[in-house]
């Protein structure tokens, strides 16, 4: 019974009220005044009450995560106003703190960092999806955290803290869920946790294993390839629109399976020293698409021409040593992280866009214009020149085709952090050393034509291959499978020293000063092959040209010598905390965050520089942390203003357009283009994505959080954040100085201006089915609309426009019974069947295409990421142990 009493009290976690808290139903106080209890976190790398930290820290614990139905980051982020997670399905997501993002990215570093215990999982682009199994708590630190968490914490840090082994105590926990709905297949989740004492007072093992299946909810319905321009209705000159996706039609096709385990072995050497070894592995497999549908096809429907697949694996090992040196506490953390994914997905719409732009006859004959220029090729069927035949993936110039992309990517990271900390009567301090080596690499055979039945390439039979054979002759790679193959490898090496000192100047006034100095080196090598194919490590692609650095490239997968860069940065922090009384604290804070710079691919002589610099985020913040009503309520208020200087933007370099004979930029599809002419920074340079420092922006907001125990049976809470994230400068993104593509006063993408949540929990003793308590919980979250990209490209003319995405509200309800060592619950997720639109994908170029076929008619080809439809579920948890 003692364990049950502990579970049903407001524990330091279950009673938490940090902004974005979603409290569990266990709110019945055992004492007369049923006061809320404090939440204890380690966000500052010291153990403190969240109400005593002079910074914006949001947290929720194990019971909250379970009872709100949080399986992944996407679920609990609904109740954290300071963080927005854009989910792309079961495999990845983009994490955004306080609106600090300029768009989707796969080159530039993230503005936010993610930690699993002491391990940094941050990588370029999106982050892996973690399962909330045997998790002690999650902590969200909004605003720059660079002093303690490094350069990837420019806008915030998300920490997932797992449960640690417990000495002398056996424990086993089973937790299972089953859910489904009218618009989705059944999903199920199961986990087992064991805590096993091995040597009394010395050695204990904790293992968590889990298996999840996410049933599909997107229907891939019958349709045909695009046959007309979406803006003008003009039919495409090619014979497109003839091929259907009948071979890939399937209901609820976007399934995903996740399996994994974590294990931790703790050794208490003596009263002062301990060591914990941890290991984790996770494997994800998905089929069909992600969570994307096309509203121009139908609700939760899409038209895709290939049954894609995706596999993701990551593993992590860590060693944590903790000890008491007398004058200070020592923590030494060594971590190894390896992430690998591969997959294949449909890009038929994307490939058709480029084909519609470039792959057509010019009605100039070879006699009228020499076909020797590599941009042009004589169509033997018509005798006319075909412009840019590399984009013709069908068997003939006007043939329809399917196209996919095959991708692999990986991250390998080794890190070491050593820190000392001490608490005194007036001064607390922490200092440390951090070292990290990271390898980030990917390969991408792009625009792979297939027959539709499988992913076997038909490139060798394509019109594009005929053109390449004509141009390259004997050097043409006979095993090439794609029009475009690219490969990139980036190395990051970082060394940092950091420290903070907190000085209690009086009993009520505390000054904290912090500093981090780091040096980060990077080297990046990028390779493109036209056409291309995958190949073994230590070899170069077939047809690889002889160059002066041939030996180097053969030993490095065809990659050229890398470009190198280095950043040396010092990041300050200062905060002042004042205790107004025993229940209320106010603080003021200044922090700075810097995202690392890097080197661009920079093939040829592009318009933008070969390197980009760190961008700087200065955060000015004030807040109040207060309890009231004899501890029955909490009120927290935070206001902040962040100045973002020289923010990084990922984009296509404008010098990739062709030149005319005079060296000026020519119309992309015009015969005036001359491939023999190249003008540095203007035209004739290779097509490439890169990163540039482009301007200034600001982000300001207010966050309020309230929780109150109305009676000993009823607790409610509400939180809300209002944010303004806008550009402060204009910037030109191409050669035309008369126009400014980025304008002052425009919103930053992917972030709502308003976000909030509320919840209410009722719990009372019960005498039914052996239960001791029954409860009912209602929760709701809402967020405002977003825009999808920074550049204001028009919906009426651009194939890749800026979309305004509407806001949404999601509500859930849960009811359950709880016994001494078991719990059973029933719930409805997405009670009103809200169709949240997380984002409209950019860069797919399907907006310019339509299908006029009577079967699968659609005005545009788009992908919209969405949530799961309304589903009903049950959960059962059983615990065995002392």
Image (tube, rainbow, N blue to C red):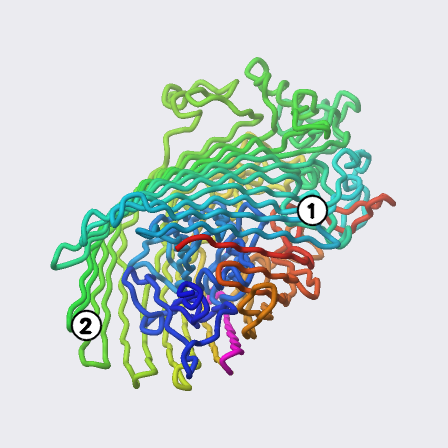
Q: Is residue 428 highlighted in magenta? A: no
Q: Is residue 718 highlighted in magenta? A: yes
Q: Is residue 641 above or below residue 311?
A: below
The answer to whether residue 165 is visible is: yes
Camera-near label (1 vs 2) is 2
Q: Is residue 209 left or right of residue 874?
A: left
Residue at the location (27% across, 44% down)?
A: 199
Task: Identify residue for label 1.
Answer: 846
Magenta-highlighted stretch: main secondary structure?
Answer: strand
Marks 1/2 in contact by CB < 8 Å: the verdict is no
Instruction: Give the residues drawn in magenta, as a range.
Output: 711-732
The first of marks 1 and 2 along the sequence is 2
Q: In which quarter of the image is the C terminus?
A: bottom left
Q: Position of residue 264 (x, y in %)?
A: 35, 45
Q: Where is residue 123 in the image (x, y as percent from the top left)?
A: 43, 46
- Label 1's element? helix
Out of 613 and 200, give the one closest to the viewer.
200
Residue at the location (57% across, 41% down)?
A: 657
Q: In this view, does 671 lie to the left or right of 878?
A: right
Mark 1 surroundings within 10 Å by alpha-carbon count, few (fewer than 14), some (14 through 19), many (20 or more): many
Separation of marks 1 and 2 at Cα, in angstroms? 58 Å
Q: Position of residue 70 (x, y in %)?
A: 53, 58
Out of 525 and 277, give the one closest to the viewer.
277
Task: Identify residue for label 2.
Answer: 503
Residue at the location (40% across, 56% down)?
A: 159
């Amino acid at each position: 019974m003692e364990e049950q009493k502990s579970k049903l009290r407001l524990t330091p976690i279950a009673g938490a009220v940090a902004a974005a808290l979603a409290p569990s139903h266990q709110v019945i106080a055992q004492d007369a005044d049923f006061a809320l209890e404090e939440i204890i976190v380690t966000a500052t790398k010291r153990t403190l009450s969240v109400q005593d930290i002079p910074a914006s820290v949001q947290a929720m614990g194990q019971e909250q995560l379970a009872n709100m139905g949080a399986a992944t980051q996407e679920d609990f982020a609904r109740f954290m106003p300071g963080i927005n997670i854009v989910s792309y399905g079961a495999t990845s997501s983009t994490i955004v703190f306080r609106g600090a993002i300029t768009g989707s990215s796969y080159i530039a570093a993230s503005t936010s960092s993610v930690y699993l215990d002491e391990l940094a999982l941050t990588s370029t682009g999106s982050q892996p999806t973690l399962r909330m199994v045997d998790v002690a708590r999650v902590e969200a630190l909004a605003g720059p955290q660079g002093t303690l968490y490094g350069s990837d914490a420019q806008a915030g840090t998300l920490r997932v803290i797992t449960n640690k082994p417990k000495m002398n105590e056996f424990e086993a926990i089973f937790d299972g869920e089953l859910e489904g709905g009218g618009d989705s297949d059944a999903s199920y989740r199961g986990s087992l946790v064991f805590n096993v004492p091995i040597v009394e007072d010395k050695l204990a093992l904790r293992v968590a294993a889990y298996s999840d299946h996410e049933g599909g909810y997107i229907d891939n319905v019958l349709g045909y390839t695009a046959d007309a321009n979406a803006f003008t209705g003009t039919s495409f000159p090619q014979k497109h629109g003839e091929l259907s996706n009948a071979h890939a039609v399937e209901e609820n096709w976007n399934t995903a399976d996740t399996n994994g385990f974590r294990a931790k072995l703790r050794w208490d050497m003596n009263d002062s020293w301990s060591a914990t070894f941890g290991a984790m592995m996770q494997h994800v497999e998905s089929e069909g698409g992600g969570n994307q549908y096309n509203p121009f096809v139908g609700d939760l429907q899409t038209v895709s021409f290939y049954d894609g697949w995706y596999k993701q694996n990551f593993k992590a090992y860590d060693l944590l040593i903790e000890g008491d040196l007398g004058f200070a506490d020592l923590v030494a953390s060594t971590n190894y992280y390896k992430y690998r994914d591969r997959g294949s997905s449909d890009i038929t719409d994307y490939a058709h866009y480029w084909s519609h732009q470039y792959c057509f006859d010019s009605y100039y004959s070879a006699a009228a214009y020499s076909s020797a220029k590599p941009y042009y090729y004589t169509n033997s069927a018509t005798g006319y020149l075909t412009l840019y035949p590399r984009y013709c993936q069908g068997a003939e110039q006007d043939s329809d085709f399917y196209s996919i992309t095959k991708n692999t990517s990986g991250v390998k990271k080794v890190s070491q952090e050593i820190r000392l900390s001490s608490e005194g009567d007036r001064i607390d301090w922490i200092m440390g050393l951090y070292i990290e080596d990271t390898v980030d690499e990917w390969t991408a055979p792009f625009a792979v034509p297939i027959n539709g039945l499988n992913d076997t390439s038909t490139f060798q039979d394509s019109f594009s291959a005929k053109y390449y054979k004509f141009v390259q002759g004997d050097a043409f790679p006979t095993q090439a499978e794609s029009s475009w193959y690219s490969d990139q490898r980036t190395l990051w090496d970082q060394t940092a020293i950091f420290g903070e000192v907190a000085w209690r100047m009086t009993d009520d006034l505390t000054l904290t000063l912090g500093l981090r100095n780091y040096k980060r080196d990077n080297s990046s090598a990028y390779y493109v092959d036209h056409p291309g194919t995958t190949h073994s490590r230590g070899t170069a692609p077939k047809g690889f040209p002889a160059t002066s650095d041939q030996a180097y490239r053969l030993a490095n997968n065809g990659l050229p010598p890398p470009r190198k860069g280095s950043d040396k940065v010092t990041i300050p922090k200062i905060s002042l905390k004042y205790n107004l009384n025993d229940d209320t604290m106010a603080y003021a804070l200044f922090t700075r965050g810097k995202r690392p710079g890097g080197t661009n691919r920079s093939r040829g002589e592009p318009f933008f520089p070969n390197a980009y610099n760190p961008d700087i985020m200065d955060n000015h913040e004030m807040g109040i942390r207060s309890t009231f009503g004899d501890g029955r309520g909490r009120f927290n208020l935070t206001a902040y203003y962040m100045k973002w200087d020289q923010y990084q933007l990922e984009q296509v370099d404008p010098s990739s357009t062709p030149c005319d004979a005079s060296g000026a930029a020519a119309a992309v599809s015009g015969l005036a283009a001359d491939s023999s002419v190249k003008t540095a920074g203007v035209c004739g340079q290779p097509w490439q994505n890169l990163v540039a420092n482009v301007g200034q922006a600001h982000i300001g907001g207010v966050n309020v959080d309230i929780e109150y125990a109305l009676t000993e049976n009823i607790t409610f809470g509400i939180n809300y954040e209002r944010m303004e994230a806008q550009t402060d400068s204009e910037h030109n993104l191409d050669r035309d100085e008369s126009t400014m593509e980025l304008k002052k006063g425009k919103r930053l993408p992917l972030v709502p201006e308003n976000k909030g949540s509320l919840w209410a929990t009722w719990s009372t003793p019960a005498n039914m089915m052996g239960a001791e308590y029954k409860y009912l919980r209602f929760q709701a979250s809402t967020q405002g609309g977003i825009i999808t990209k920074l550049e204001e490209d028009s919906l009426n003319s651009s194939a890749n426009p800026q979309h305004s995405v509407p806001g949404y509200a999601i509500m859930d309800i849960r009811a359950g019974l709880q016994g001494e060592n078991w719990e059973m619950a029933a719930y409805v997720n997405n009670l009103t069947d809200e169709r949240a639109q997380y984002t409209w994908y950019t860069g797919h170029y399907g907006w310019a295409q339509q299908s006029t076929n009577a079967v699968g008619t659609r005005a545009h080809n788009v992908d919209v990421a969405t949530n799961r439809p309304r589903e009903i579920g049950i959960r059962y948890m059983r615990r065995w142990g002392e």
